[in-house]
Amino acid sequence: MMTAPPQSLPLDATLYEAARVMRDEGIGDVLVTYAGRLCGVVTDRDIVVRAVAESRDTALTPLGEVCTAELITVRPDDDTGTVARLMCEQAVRRLPVVDAEQRPVGVVSIGDLALADGEGGLLSEISKAPPNN
């Protein structure tokens, strides 16, 4: 049910690079890594609120200055019930999926859960719609 492989960039990549990946891939987040291990996530909202609204130069600001480092993650073998419960408890819309060494292998989003839950629901239909770039 996860989206794999995840889009990731190293900690010292810039916000500009992350924004281009998000645009090109039609996604709203990029995982941030250090030595191949997950250390954060940056979202389109992070870029707007923590950088653009603060007049930071997106071409010079590294992801490490803006990304969220306190993450809740799941494993590839976690079931949809566990993922949904964590999303509700933590009030998040996406969770990174990591292996035993904390290397990112995917991202599961609320849309992925809706699609996994089966056809017919409104959220499932919305999740199937193409991005409106």
Image: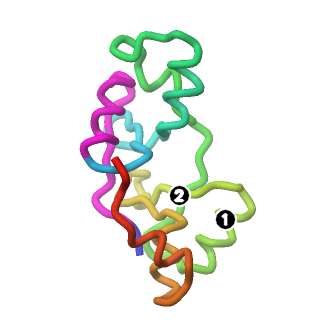
Q: In the rendering, at what x and y percent does residue 122 appear?
A: 56, 79
Residue 91, by quadrant, is: bottom right
Secondary structure under tag 1 reads helix
SS label for mark 2: strand
Comparing 57 with 84, the one in front is 57
Quick one: label 1 or label 2, which is nearer the N terminus? 1
Magenta stretch: give its range: 3-24
Residue drawn at the location 35% of the way across and 32% of the way down:
19
Q: Is residue 9 magenta?
A: yes
Query: With respect to residue 91, does 29 lie above or below?
Result: above
Quadrant placement of the N terminus: bottom left
Task: Tell me if residue 78 is in the magenta stretch.
Answer: no
Tally of numbered tags? 2
The residue indicated by pointer 1 is 86
Dot label at residue 95:
2
Checking the image for residue 40, the label placed there is: none
C-alpha span from label 1 to label 2: 9 Å
Locate residue 120, reporting x and y percent: 51, 89
